[in-house]
Image: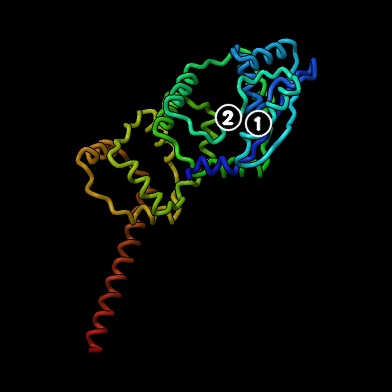
Amino acid sequence: MGIKAATAQNRPWEIYALVDPRTDEVRYVGVTHRPKLRMVQHFNEARSGGATHKARWLSILLKEGLRPLRLVIDSGCGNGWQEKEKYWIAKYRNLGFPLTNISDGGEGALGVPVSDEVRKKRSEARKNWKPRPEHLEALLAYSRSMTGKHLSAEHRAKISAAHKGKPHTPEHNAAVARANTGKKHSEETKQKLSIAQRGKHNIKHTPEACEKISKAKKGKKRRPLTAEHRAKQSAALRGRKWSEKEYLSHCGKKRGPCPQERRERISHALRGRVRPLEASAKQSATYAARTLAEARRISSEVCRGLAALFAA
């Protein structure tokens, strides 16, 4: 049994009737497992000029500012809805109600797999679909009504849990990249991003995350920085005092041989530069302290070696 079939067997359903508010007559009997969405589909079909009897009836109601009454007449879970739908359609027809159903029921799409051809047709129809002006206005009105509202912590947790682990297709990622290409953040947004990212450079990634980052960056050439960007980085780092931890971490890094081009750039940048006496004194003191510490370490090792030799 496939996943879709198993899901359909455990899915709740309900049989409902749509009643004309002008005459109190039952005009349609249907089955659904998503009541709200099904009613939206009925109204969308009517507004878009559907050719069925039901769509034309609903269109007339909507033009008069009316909506049908919806009554739940049966419900259940899993299978069994086919016979129930047939039963209720036959019953209301026998009672003389002018139903707009075009069939005797039981042939709904609950749990029925859709062919690739039908999926393709639906996809093409959605790609060429353009919203009506009133639809856009309704969406804007809903967006304005939600502005300033904050979701509860429980609501946010549910949304987060629903989206966790959901992979995006390469097409989706490419579309997002195209949509964001060329966008420029405002100064306020840049400031917020800067504040949010502060202190994150010390985050330790897991080995799996490091491996993913490494694979993603392999073979990619870094874009050359503009003169304006380099000037901003230089101004931001100028006069910055490193903490002892940062200094030791930087000094402990093993670097490869410096390329000749970079050596020439550094030489050209430092040519004719006069260092302040305070900076020279600090550097001399640092070198002296390092030399003294190295001498002490070597002396200690020699003493331990001699002691071991005499002990033997």
Q: Percent x, y for residue 300?
A: 30, 75
Instruction: Name which of mark 2 and mark 1 comes first in the sequence.
Output: 1
- On the image, the x and y values in percent for residue 153 come to 66, 43
Report the residue at 46% width, 23% height from top: 123
Q: Of the numbered discs in the image, which one, if any, rests on residue 130?
A: none
At 29% from the left edge and 54% from the top edge, which residue is drawn?
254
- Quadrant for residue 52, please give it: top right
Where residue 38 sits: x, y (%)?
Answer: 63, 27
Left or right: 85 in relation to 118: right
Amino acid type of the residue that numbered disc 2 sits on in the rendered structure: Gly
- Nearest to the observer: residue 115 or residue 139: 115
Rounded to the nearest angstrom, the CA distance separating label 2 from label 1 is 9 Å
Closer to viewer: mark 2 or mark 1: 1
Q: In the figure, 286 relative to 183: above or below?
A: below
Give the quarter of the image for residue 296: bottom left
Q: Which residue is mark 2?
A: 108
* Of residues 310 and 86, the one drawn nearer to the viewer in this rendering: 86
Question: Can you identify the residue that label 1 sits on?
Answer: 85
Q: Residue at x 60, y 30 (%)?
A: 106
The kind of residue tagged 1 is Glu
Marks 2 and 1: CB-CB under 8 Å?
yes
Looking at the picture, does residue 107 appear above or below residue 294?
above
Question: Which residue ends up furthest to the left in the rendered image?
Answer: 260
| Closer to the camera in the image, 127 or 139 | 127
Q: SS of the residue at dot 1?
A: helix
